[in-house]
Amino acid sequence: MPDFAFLTNHGKALLLIAHDPHSRMRDIAQELGITERATQRIVGDLVDAGYIDRERDGRRNRYIVKTHLPLGLPQRDIDLGSLLTILVDQEDAESTAAA
């Protein structure tokens, strides 16, 4: 394994949320190998940047990924939905998409 990752923890957290919109902080933290507090900051950053919306669903949160937003890549920018199509099963990406 290389000493680097192609995706940051922000990107990885977004993928986990896209796969399961009812993800808990504890589960995301465990998958990423980081603390729950760090996960809360990352999810907060994603909400603040507008990439996801957070809604209360009973005692838990439900996340909605805004797939129409651009990623801000150099040269040829793509939207978040296009990236999710590549990295997540199409069925999962469609079920969590909000256009």
Image: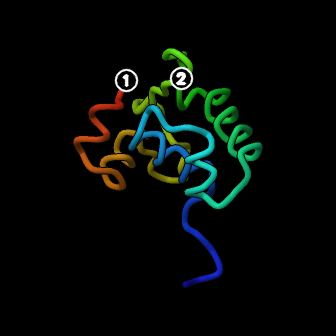
**How far apart are the alpha carbons under marks 2 and 1?**
10 Å
Q: Quadrant of residue 45?
A: top right
Q: Quadrant of residue 96?
A: top left
Q: Earlier in the sequence, mark 2 or mark 1?
A: 2
Residue wearing tag 1: 98
| Residue 47 x, y percent position in the rendering | 62, 28
Residues at marks 2 and 1 touching, judged by CB atoms closer than 8 Å: yes
Q: Secondary structure at mark 1?
A: loop
Tag on residue 24? none
Residue drawn at x 30%, y 47% as measured from the top left? 85
Residue drawn at x 47%, y 47% as measured from the top left? 16
37 relative to 30 in the view: left or right: right
Q: In this orientation, which residue lies closer to the viewer: 73 or 4?
A: 4
5 relative to 69 in the view: left or right: right
Q: Residues within 10 Å of mark 1 (few under 14, many from 20)?
A: some
The amino acid type of the residue labelled 2 equals Asp
Residue drawn at x 48%, y 40% as measured from the top left? 17
Q: In this orientation, which residue lies closer to the viewer: 53 or 28?
A: 28
| Residue 20 x, y percent position in the rendering | 41, 39
The amino acid type of the residue labelled 1 equals Ala
| Residue 27 x, y percent position in the rendering | 56, 47
Residue ranking furthest to the bottom = 1
Residue wearing tag 2: 53
Q: Residues within 10 Å of mark 2 (few under 14, many from 20)?
A: some
16 relative to 28 in the view: left or right: left
Residue drawn at x 46%, y 32% as measured from the top left? 22
Residue ranking furthest to the front = 59
Q: Quadrant of the N terminus?
A: bottom right
Q: Secondary structure at mark 2?
A: strand
Q: Quadrant of the C terminus?
A: top left
Q: Is residue 32 above or below residue 61?
A: below
